[in-house]
Image: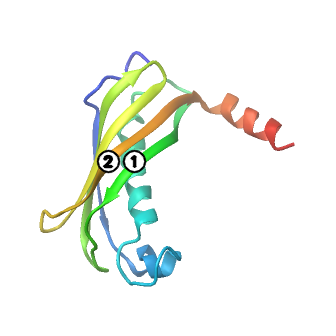
Amino acid sequence: MEHLQAGLTAVLDWVVADTDTAESLGSGDVPVLATPRLLAWLEAATVAAVAKELPAGSTSVGTRVEIQHERACLVGTAVRTTAVLAHVDGRLLRFTVGAEDDAGNRLAAGVVTRTAVDRDRFMQRIHNSSA
């Protein structure tokens, strides 16, 4: 994990679609960006931030999320998500994350923690535990 250094960053852009709403995902009954979708977009940014620096055969898995979804936005709104690797402790990766709309309004902020793992060993362990 020696290539993983604090400061690695990813920025991903999205546009809220009907399938991204609380109404569509069942997390509410209004046609605004759903918190679960926003969280997925924030996690995608964390994955992208370290993807090129992880050793071959490795990946990262989410272990903790602390997000404040501060503002609603409608279908058609452009959303920019950002993840910055803030702390590395062995395999533990802690990211600061945020999202803003196309007007620059902050939609969300928080911390996502991931753990770097060997992909094959991780999947083998999951298969063995579900057997």
Q: Residue at x 27, y 63 (%)?
A: 70
Horizontal and vertical percent for residue 72?
28, 73
Q: Residues within 10 Å of mark 1 (few under 14, many from 20)?
A: few
- Image color mode: rainbow
Question: Can you give x and y, in whole percent of width and height, for residue 5 in the image?
Answer: 32, 22
Of all residues, the one furthest to the left in this rendering is 103
Q: Secondary structure at mark 1?
A: strand
**Quadrant of the image containing the N terminus:** top left
Q: Which residue is mark 1?
A: 66
Q: Are marks 2 and 1 in contact (CB under 8 Å)?
A: yes
List x then y, in percent, for residue 126.
Answer: 74, 39
Residue 75 in sight in this render: yes
Mark 2–mark 1 distance (CA, rounded to whole Å): 5 Å
- Amino acid type at circle 2 is Gly
State which quadrant residue 38 falls in.
Answer: bottom left
Q: Position of residue 78 (x, y in %)?
A: 24, 69
Which residue occupies 36% across, 52% down? 67
Residue 110 - label: 2
Residue type marked 1 = Glu
